[in-house]
């Protein structure tokens, strides 16, 4: 443990698997107390167990991100369990890929609800807690929101107009909040990752499609979630206190 997040408390949404799980485990190993959120309660509870087994601190929250009520419950879990909140990672996500002419209304709504409305609602709940604190503090600490966007949210993707629109919206949240909240020392950044997870494994089943996909990465491969997590630790730590409103691609050179 290097304790770069010692004394801090973070919420990580969608932390039962993939990138969110790696981020939650890394945050805890750096000394943070972590609220592990996931709709898959068995997965969330297992991540809490792993963190505690490693000597870390965690609590699970199994609300489905996408509503103001779920967002408020996440902040309540952080405050009731740890008594504070320092960082929010808006990571939860789903794909409902389909070409525009065949996409169903529910597929558009589901993706926008989790990625865009979910991030907006969680950001609002965190900021409603932080604002009155920040106004009274003389030595104000930096607080962090880390949103998760995607290559699709930067350059678009065939069959992902719902997802690309939501993830471009997440970039809009990131830049607008950075401008709105900088005066309160709340830093807002986004990460565009690429990693082999349950979300991306189906894209690699077909050999020809997989090699075509990998040819788009300068480094020629998908990363592991554990290779993405250090960028989140950096953005949650005091090392990034002078960075806000930025999108960092942690993607092996997919978007250059
Ligand atoms: N894997 C990649 O290459 C890649 C690329 C670009 C962006 N992303 C983004 O990274 C994030 C994590 O993706 P991943 O690859 O780890 O996916 P994943 O499918 O492995 O994990 C996503 C987790 O989110 C949970 N989840 C889904 N809907 C939820 C909700 N409403 N509330 C709470 N939890 C919910 C799932 O149960 C799952 O455990 C997503 O926002 C995704 O869009 C991933």
Image (cartoon, helix red, strand yellow):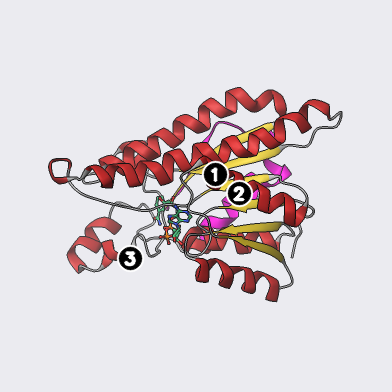
Residue of label 3: 201
Which residue is at the front of the view, 149 or 52?
52
Disc 1 and disc 2 in contact, CB within 8 angstroms: yes
What element does badge 2 sit on?
helix
Whether residue 241 sits left or right of residue 70 in the image: it is right
Which of pointers 3 and 1 lies earlier in the amino acid sequence? 1
Quarter of the rendering occupied by the N terminus: bottom right
Q: Position of residue 223 (x, y in %)?
A: 44, 61
Is 204 above or below relative to 235? below
Disc 3 and disc 2 in contact, CB within 8 angstroms: no
State whether residue 5 appears in this view: no
Residue of label 1: 69
What element does badge 3 sit on?
helix
Q: Is residue 250 magenta?
A: yes
> Which of label 3 and label 1 is nearer to you?
1
CA gap, disc 3 and disc 2 = 31 Å
Residue of label 2: 73
Q: Residue at x 26, y 40 (%)?
A: 161
Q: Point out the stretch of residues depicted in magenta.
A: 227-251
Which residue is at the front of the view, 40 or 251?
40
Q: Residue at x 29, y 39 (%)?
A: 156
- When asked about the image quadrant of residue 184, the answer is top right
Q: Outermost residue, left direction?
A: 101
Is 152 above or below relative to 187? below
């Amino acid at each position: 443990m290097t304790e770069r997040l010692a004394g801090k408390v973070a919420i990580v949404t969608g932390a039962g698997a993939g990138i969110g799980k790696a981020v939650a485990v890394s945050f805890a190993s750096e000394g943070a107390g972590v609220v592990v959120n996931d709709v898959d309660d068995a997965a969330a509870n297992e991540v809490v167990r792993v963190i505690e087994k490693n000597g870390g601190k965690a609590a699970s929250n199994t609300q489905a991100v996408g509503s103001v009520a779920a967002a408020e419950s996440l902040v309540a879990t952080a405050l009731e369990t740890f008594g504070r909140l320092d960082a929010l990672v808006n990571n939860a996500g789903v794909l409902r890929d389909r070409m525009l002419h065949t996409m169903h209304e529910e597929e558009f709504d589901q993706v926008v609800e989790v990625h865009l409305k979910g991030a907006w609602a969680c950001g609002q709940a965190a900021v409603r807690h932080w604002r009155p604190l920040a106004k009274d503090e003389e030595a104000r600490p930096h607080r962090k929101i880390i949103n998760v966007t995607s290559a699709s949210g930067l350059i678009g993707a065939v069959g992902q107009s719902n997802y690309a629109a939501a993830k471009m919206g997440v970039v809009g949240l990131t830049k607008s909040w950075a401008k709105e909240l900088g005066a309160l020392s709340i830093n807002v950044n986004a990460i565009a990752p690429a990693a082999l997870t349950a979300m991306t494994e189906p894209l690699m089943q077909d050999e020809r499609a997989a090699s075509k996909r990998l040819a788009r990465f300068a480094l020629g491969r998908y990363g592991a979630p554990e290779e993405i997590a250090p960028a989140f630790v950096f953005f949650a730590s005091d090392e990034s206190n002078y960075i806000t409103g930025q999108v960092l691609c942690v993607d092996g050179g997919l978007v250059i």
